[in-house]
Image (cartoon, helix red, strand yellow):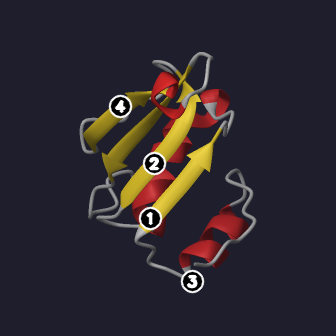
């Protein structure tokens, strides 16, 4: 397992981290990406084409584009937590559907 700090808004950081991949799994929680959601979905296929991604976020906030296959949505209550979050597990497309960042 490798962990790296990456500024999702930085092309330099994305290219640096992508150069260490491809990755099999991408995990994230409370990424606060509401202001840059389009970019978020374009970056994932560059980091981990065909991999599985799991993200914990506010219920209903994650609506992946049609290229992503949502495998499962699990309410936070399954984890014994009270709160307004869910975990979304999705398959990242194998191709870079978004083109340039």
Q: CA distance from mark 2 to mark 4?
A: 10 Å
Q: CA distance from mark 3 to mark 1?
A: 13 Å
Residue at left offset 50%, top offset 37%? 38
Q: Secondary structure at mark 1?
A: strand
User: Dot 4 surroundings within 10 Å: few (below 14), some, or many (20 or more)?
Assistant: some
Q: Going from the N terminus, do you reach mark 4 or mark 3 first?
A: 3
Q: Residue furthest front?
A: 80
Q: CA distance from mark 2 to mark 1?
A: 8 Å
CB atoms at circles 2 and 1 under 8 Å apart? yes
Q: Going from the N terminus, do you reach mark 2 or mark 1 first?
A: 1
Q: Position of residue 28 (x, y in %)?
A: 59, 49
Q: CA distance from mark 2 to mark 3?
A: 20 Å
Is 55 placed above or below 100 here?
Answer: above
Q: Work out whether residue 59 or residue 46 is closer to the camera in this orientation and state it.
A: 59
Q: Nearer the viewer, mark 3 or mark 1?
A: 1
Q: What residue would you read off at disc 4?
A: 73
User: Dot 3 surroundings within 10 Å: few (below 14), some, or many (20 or more)?
Assistant: few
Q: What residue would you read off at disc 3?
A: 20
Q: Going from the N terminus, do you reach mark 2 or mark 3 first?
A: 3
Residue at left offset 44%, top offset 64%? 25
Q: What residue would you read off at disc 2?
A: 54
Q: Going from the N terminus, do you reach mark 2 or mark 4 first?
A: 2
Quadrant (top left/top right/bottom left/bottom right) for the N terminus: bottom right
CB atoms at circles 4 and 3 under 8 Å apart? no
Q: What residue would you read off at disc 1?
A: 25
Q: Going from the N terminus, do you reach mark 3 or mark 1 first?
A: 3
Q: Residue furthest bottom?
A: 20
Q: CA distance from mark 4 to mark 3?
A: 29 Å
Q: Position of residue 97 (x, y in %)?
A: 32, 53
Residue at left offset 33%, top offset 55%? 92
Q: Is residue 59 visible?
A: yes
Q: Work out whether residue 101 or residue 79 is closer to the camera in this orientation and state it.
A: 79
């Amino acid at each position: 397992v490798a962990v790296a700090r990456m500024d999702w808004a930085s092309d330099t950081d994305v290219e640096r981290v992508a150069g260490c991949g491809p990755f099999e799994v991408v995990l994230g929680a409370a990424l606060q990406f509401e202001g840059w959601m389009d970019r978020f979905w374009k970056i994932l296929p560059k980091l981990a084409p065909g991999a599985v991604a799991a993200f914990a976020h506010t219920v209903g906030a994650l609506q992946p584009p049609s290229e992503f296959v949502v495998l499962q949505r699990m309410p936070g209550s399954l984890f014994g937590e009270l709160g307004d979050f869910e975990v979304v597990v999705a398959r990242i497309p194998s191709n870079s559907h978004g083109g340039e960042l």
